[in-house]
Image (cartoon, helix red, strand yellow):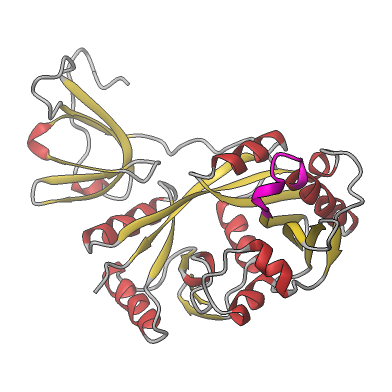
């Protein structure tokens, strides 16, 4: 990281650069450290009262006094990712929202407020896709009130570190004491290799509807059956996959929604006694075959960062990270 011009450190940022991506060097807050300086790169989300706040791509917020600042400059945004199917963050967010639809929605400028009786954070959070037409504090108040009317906690989905407007929103929510939860990744892959990833998939059965036994095997509703089935069954072209044991009970399930070129995978779950047998791969391969037949060519899925087993499977199937996101939830009252 180079700050010098003619051998001299320079501070080339000011309060006018709030909202921009910056690189700064400051005195190390740990006096006993062998390193005299600490470097930080991220979005300058605020500079008030002599205190700077920078949000890194990971979502971490770094706060320090301007008196410790020894160098700083505005830097270009992170280069676009070239791996996997080409797509913007907004395209994938909109596609994923159609593929996991809330029962009730409302618009606030280019924000979508979503509610589904508490079934999953995705279907019960505000999704900011652009300007909301209001100052951030007023917009957050509107969101909070909308969810309160539905007896739900207010929650907002934040794209981690990019675009800049999400970093500013994240900083506003942090200032209000909203907690961070559910760090996740949007991952994409070419669809055909997913379909070719396993041996014949004859034991996987597909259905247009999810019955109660499929829902029980999925096992992660946290809401009424009616709300869960409304979200799971929503989307342009939805398929449910099931593998049953000899007694006829479901031991592995999965879901895919096909929307133009995209096939979205979700709700892949294998019973504890049947894991490490390739069932999840078979489920996804059979769903991919169906999606290819309907004209899809690209795949996406959303997975929480702490789900190591699922992450390893998706690595094997060729999925790469497109972007990261997390949720902010209002402080408990």
- Picture coordinates of residue 210 (x, y %)? 74, 71
- Picture coordinates of residue 7 (x, y %)? 20, 12
Dividing the picture into quarters, in which one does residue 31 lie?
top left
Q: Is residue 183 above or below residue 102?
A: above
Q: Residue at x 22, y 38 (%)?
A: 13
Q: Is 201 within the magenta? A: no
- Picture coordinates of residue 60 (x, y %)? 32, 43
Q: Residue at x 90, y 56 (%)?
A: 293
> Split into 4 quadrants, where in the image is the C terminus?
bottom left
On screen, residue 274 versus residue 226, left or right, reads: right
Q: Residue at x 74, y 59 (%)?
A: 256
Q: Is residue 333 above or below residue 289?
A: below
Q: Nearer the viewer, residue 310 or 296?
A: 310
Q: Residue at x 58, y 43 (%)?
A: 322
> Split into 4 quadrants, where in the image is the N terminus?
top left
* Tally of marks: 0
- Would residue 140 be visible to someone looking at this image? yes
Q: Nearer the viewer, residue 209 or 123?
A: 209
On screen, residue 50 versus residue 11, left or right, reads: left
Dividing the picture into quarters, in which one does residue 320 lie?
top right
Dividing the picture into quarters, in which one does residue 173 lie?
bottom left
- Would residue 259 be visible to someone looking at this image? no
- Picture coordinates of residue 222 (x, y %)? 52, 70
On screen, residue 43 versus residue 319, left or right, reads: left
Outermost residue toward the bottom? 149
Q: What stretch of residues is rendered in magenta? A: 269-279
Q: Is residue 262 above or below residue 40?
A: below
On screen, residue 299 versus residue 54, left or right, reads: right
Outermost residue toward the front? 247
């Amino acid at each position: 990281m180079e700050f010098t011009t003619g051998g001299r450190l320079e501070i080339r940022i000011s309060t006018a650069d709030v909202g921009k991506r910056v690189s700064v060097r400051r005195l190390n807050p740990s006096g006993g450290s062998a390193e005299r300086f600490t470097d930080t790169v991220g979005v300058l989300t605020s500079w008030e009262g002599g205190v700077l706040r920078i949000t890194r791509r990971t979502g971490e917020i770094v706060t320090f006094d301007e008196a410790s600042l020894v160098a700083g400059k505005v830097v270009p945004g992170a280069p676009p990712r070239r791996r996997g199917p080409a797509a913007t963050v907004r395209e994938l967010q909109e596609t994923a929202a159609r593929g996991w639809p809330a029962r009730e929605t409302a618009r606030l400028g280019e924000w979508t407020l979503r509610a589904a009786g508490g079934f999953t954070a995705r279907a019960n959070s505000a999704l900011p896709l652009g300007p909301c037409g209001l100052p951030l504090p007023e917009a957050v108040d509107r969101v909070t009130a909308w969810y309160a009317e539905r007896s739900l906690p207010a929650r907002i989905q934040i794209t981690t570190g990019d675009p800049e407007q999400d970093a500013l929103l994240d900083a506003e929510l942090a200032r209000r004491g909203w907690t961070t939860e559910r760090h996740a990744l949007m991952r994409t892959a070419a669809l055909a290799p997913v379909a070719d990833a396993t041996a014949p998939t004859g034991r996987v059965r597909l259905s247009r509807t999810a019955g109660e036994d499929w829902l029980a095997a999925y096992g992660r509703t946290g809401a009424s059956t009616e709300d869960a089935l409304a979200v799971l069954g929503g989307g342009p072209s939805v398929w449910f996959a099931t593998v049953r044991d000899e007694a006829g009970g479901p031991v592995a399930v999965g879901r895919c929604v096909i929307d133009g070129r995209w096939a979205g995978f979700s709700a892949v779950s294998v019973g504890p006694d049947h894991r490490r047998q390739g069932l999840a791969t078979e489920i996804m391969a059979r769903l991919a075959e169906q999606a290819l037949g309907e004209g899809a060519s690209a795949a996406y899925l959303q997975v929480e960062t702490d789900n190591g087993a699922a992450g390893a499977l998706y690595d094997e199937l060729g999925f790469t990270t497109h972007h990261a996101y997390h949720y902010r939830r209002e402080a408990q009252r």
